[in-house]
């Protein structure tokens, strides 16, 4: 793979990871500080993983292992999702739109997927926080990816 492609991929993945970590940090902090209405995307993830393991007739892990697997899966999948954001001039706009789409999906999709609606839609505040935090993750991913691209261009022009 040519260096420029590898560099672009690294910028996208690093931006995506930054967005995923920002999202996870906000979710986990709020979960501990506002248990009454904070989104519980960890609960959705654990429900989903339990369902998948059940369909595969795989053993069910204990709660701590299930939580850790869910967190790793969330960070991995959100990194890949946010890495779709371009690192160019429109990175923040794309981050805003992809983050907004993820947040709305996080509120709307759990019910039809059989995961329940309470973890992301318990109260109007829960719904708003879900959308806002995924949007924040998208903005962070776009900003970091764009900053890395600009830094790379400056280094190459010297």
Image (cartoon, rainbow, N blue to C red):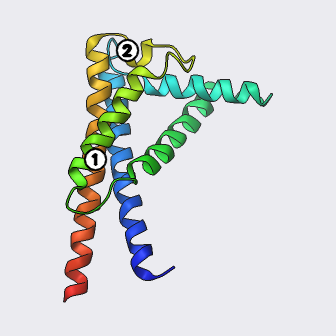
Total numbered circles:
2
Q: Residue 121 shows which numbered tag?
A: 2
Say whether residue 9 is left or right of residue 138: right
Say whether residue 118 is left or right of residue 156: right
Residue at x-position 39% and y-position 19%: 120
Query: In x, y percent, where is residue 157?
Result: 20, 86
Marks 2 and 1 in Cβ contact (< 8 Å): no
Say whether residue 120 is left or right of residue 129: right
Q: Is residue 80 above or below residue 51?
A: below
Which label sits in the foreground, 2 or 1?
1
Mark closest to the chain's N terminus, 2 or 1 = 1
Pick whichever, 78 or 93, lies toward us.
93
Residue at x-position 20% and y-position 61%: 89
Q: Secondary structure at mark 2?
A: helix
Q: Is residue 122 above or below residue 134?
A: above
Q: Quadrant of residue 128?
A: top left
Query: In x, y percent, where is residue 52?
Result: 68, 29
Residue at x-position 45% and y-position 13%: 117
Q: From the image, tell me which residue sits under label 1.
A: 95
Query: In x, y percent, where is residue 7?
Result: 39, 74
Q: Secondary structure at mark 1?
A: helix
Quadrant assignment for the C terminus: bottom left
Q: CA distance from mark 2 to mark 1?
A: 23 Å
Residue at x-position 19% and y-position 79%: 154
Q: Callout 1 environment at 10 Å: few (<14), some (14 to 19), or many (20+)?
A: many
């Amino acid at each position: 793979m040519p260096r420029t492609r590898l560099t672009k991929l690294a910028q996208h993945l690093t931006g995506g990871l930054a967005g995923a970590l920002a999202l996870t940090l906000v979710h986990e902090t709020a979960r501990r500080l506002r248990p009454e209405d904070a989104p519980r995307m960890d609960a959705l993830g654990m429900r989903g993983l339990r369902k998948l393991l059940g369909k595969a007739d795989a053993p069910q892990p204990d709660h701590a292992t299930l939580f850790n697997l869910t967190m790793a899966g969330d960070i991995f999948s959100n990194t890949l999702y946010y890495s779709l954001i371009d690192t160019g001039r429109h990175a923040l706009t794309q981050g805003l739109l992809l983050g907004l789409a993820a947040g709305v999906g996080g509120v709307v999709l759990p019910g039809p997927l059989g995961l329940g609606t309470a973890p992301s839609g318990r109260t109007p505040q829960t719904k708003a926080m879900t959308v806002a935090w995924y949007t924040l993750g998208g903005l962070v991913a776009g900003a970091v990816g764009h900053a890395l691209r600009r830094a790379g261009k400056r280094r190459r022009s010297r």
